Image: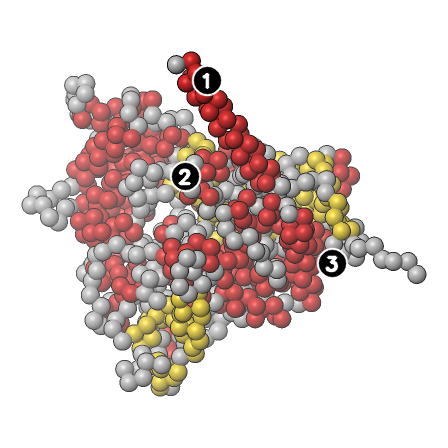
Amino acid sequence: MAAVFRWLLRGFLALAVLALAAVGIAYWFLARSLTDPDGRWVARGVSAPVEIVRDVHAIPHVFGETDEDVFFGLGFAHAQDRLWQMTLLRRTVQGRLSELFGAETLQTDALMRRLDLAGAARASVPAQDPATRAMLEAYADGVNAWIAEVDQGALGRGAPEFFFFEPAIAAWSPADSIAILKLLALQLSPHLEAEVLRARLSLLLEDEGRVDDLLPEVPGPGLAALPPVETVDYGALAPGVAPDAGPLRHAAAHPLSPFRRMPFAGASNAFAAGPERAASGGALLANDPHMALTAPTPWYLARLDLRGGAVIGGTIPGVPAVLAGRSDRMGWGVTASYADDVDVHLERVDPEDSSRYRTPEGWAPFAMRDSIVRVADGAPVTLRLRWTANGPVMTGDLYDLASITPEGHVMSVAWPALSREDTSMTAARRLMAARDVGEGIEAGALFLAPTLNLTLADADGAVALKTVGALPRRDAGHATLGRMPSPGWVEANRWQGTLPYATNPEFVDPPGGIVGNTNNKTVDRPFPTHVSYIWGDAVRVNRWRTLMQRRAVHTRESFVEAQLDTVSQAARVLLPLIGAELFFTGEAAAEGTPERQRRRAIDLLAEWNGEMSEHRPEPLIYAAWLRALQQRLIRDEIGPLAGEFPHPDPIFLERVFRDVGGAGQWCDILQSAPEESCADIARIALDDALVWIAEHHPGELESVRWGDAHQATHDHPVLGQIPVVRWLVNIRQSTSGGNATLMRGRTRGGAGDDAFENVHAATYRGVYDFADPDASIFVTSTGQSGHPLSRHYEDLGQLWRRGEYVPMILDPALARAGAEGVTVIAPPSRPEG
């Protein structure tokens, strides 16, 4: 027996040694791609040595003799730290994901090929001004220099992900950077899905007023000045399309899909105060763009020492520009504008010749070509791509267009981002060079897509907000006002170019000294200069206004406080409405009964101030109650289509409980004989919510924590799906905030166990004080490195979770003094003589 034991022990030790050796070897190979902050490299493409000075948070400060050298250095740094992320973004926009991931991404690739954003980007390169083309070429040279070093030096294939997939990396090109900017526009656009959803509801609900309940106009000052919107019966425009209460089939289902569901199409805060409203006497600006949480974050902090002045702030790997940040003279912040820059058109196909479609002048041929999608472990797929004068023809799987497409028709999409003369990259470069608000607004004239609200502040004390991006010029006789698909062969439904840039909303140095945007409605203008019928926020802006007006003057700290504010104004408004007949009523109930649990919940909510604190139970009770309430109200009327409203809408709920325009009828359950009141539904929904909480968060109700349900989910889009590996690459954090707070933490939504996970939040925060520019502070939601073995993979994310920031300075001496390391890229030495 002793001998057997010895042999078993020896076998176990041998296996353990082999396992440790395997882990050690794997770690050695994976660690080869970690960034060396003190690297020394020789590369063609620079005119003189370039220095990349990385501070203790791995934020690069890039110095060079010329601007082109600096952009070369940024490309080199981006590739060192985020090569996999950059190549994945490029493959996404090119429609080439299936070459790596097989048939599961084929739908995404097919849709991207039909939009042809990559082709539009290639065609747009000549449209840039000479300085921008030089910037793009130098940046591409920097990326390619690092790819060459990876290939020559066997540097762990450049990133751990390349060990799982084909390691070959194509050279970077200027068009790739433009394409990624177009991809960002796609991720920020909610209007295509909104048009499909409104058409579906129009077919399903006989009363158009009920459609307006679910997709309401945003109320507020000036709304009464708008002329009434004529209701449109989509069935009359698209005869033969039957009402369908089934759920929409979404192209956004795959983690790598860039097609965002409407609730996640973009959100942000940006606000600025002039000197008269700032305690320091200089302008203040704060910005926190909200995007899908990923590991790594979409943002990468950097400082560029350009000849016209240094700039510092947030970049997107793959794009050679600071898209949100400041120079020594001006700061700029971005928010999603929600401008209606997308139209879907019905295109009638010639029944005698399917290669033609109807136009105002008669039948015309589709522009057509074939595109081959290569599929890993599968046969290549050939796509027939078609275009009309209105835009590319899309298949029915894009936001379920098939459900509203009549027989003998197809759908096309009109969108400025499809332009083949897109100068948005030139606008981004000129914005970095702008010296004051006036020059910043002038630079914005060249933006096409994405449409953004640009918030500006300069060293002279000026502040402004300007909507940038191309807004379509629509005919006043448009059949659907751009809210639903319209016949593309009718001239009045087609675009007549774009509106003049001067008509884009603009606010410069307002009398109150403060400008800002939380994705809220910015102007009340009649169609066709309306800007939009849907907006990303109608609630958070009220809390922002309260915080701004609470003080006569602001400081950097008060702006930080506003960014991190977690009070839900929606909760303060809705709870007295939906609980009007539940608060402070009823007799004491026996312990353990549903009535007793309901009373405990009501008592907690009655004393709650609406703060969505991760440490409290009330936010979870409130969130679960509203979710159950909205589903109780709408599911009997619209069936499975209720799943397209995964988040409670405060405006809808307020309309129902105030019975605005007869909206109180949503409370009656159609299938039941009694007539239920809104109080009945509120009580039933609260019981539903408490049952869900008891199942998923057992224990005393008072001990439940919102943060346990509201976990920030920074998931790696590829490795995060692999068992075991995902525990190493995905990041989870308990967080405060919610769907309607300034520190927004958008929940996943729906009815699943993970419904309240925080999946969409501020991925970048910056606050700039022009009385003391080097006191400006920044943070991102994970870290600078995309390498899971790097200590900079999530170090900034720990600060982000706690509401902390890091300073970023323009002083070169201070940057070098606190450096973690200095990378030097030198040109090849020239032979003497």
Residue for point 31% across, 61% down: 400
Which corner quadrant holds the N terminus? top left
> Which residue does the numbered mark 2 point to in the structure image?
723
Type of colouring: secondary structure
Is residue 798 or residue 142 the one in the foreground?
142
Q: Residue furthest right?
A: 833
Q: Which mark is residue 176?
A: none
Mark 1 touches mark 3? (CB < 8 Å): no
User: Where does the image place residue 546, in percent across and percent down from the top left?
Assistant: 46, 39
> Which residue does the numbered mark 1 point to in the structure image?
6
Residue type at tag 3: Gly
Question: Which label lies toward us, 3 or 2?
Answer: 2
Relative to 739, 655 lies left or right = left
Is residue 114 or residue 618 the one in the foreground?
114
Q: Is residue 543 visible?
A: no
Give the quarter of the image for residue 558: top right
User: Where does the image place residue 176, in percent across and percent down from the top left?
Assistant: 57, 61
Q: Is residue 113 visible?
A: yes
Q: Residues within 10 Å of mark 1 (few under 14, many from 20)?
A: few
Q: Which mark is residue 45?
A: 3
Question: Which label lies toward us, 2 or 1?
Answer: 1
User: Where does the image place residue 800, in percent across and percent down from the top left?
Assistant: 53, 35
SS for dot 1: helix
Q: Residue furthest left?
A: 673
> Residue 76, relative to residue 427: is it above or below?
above
Residue for point 47% across, 55% down: 100
Relative to 369, 65 lies left or right = right
SS for dot 2: loop
Distance of mark 3 from mark 2, alpha carbons?
42 Å
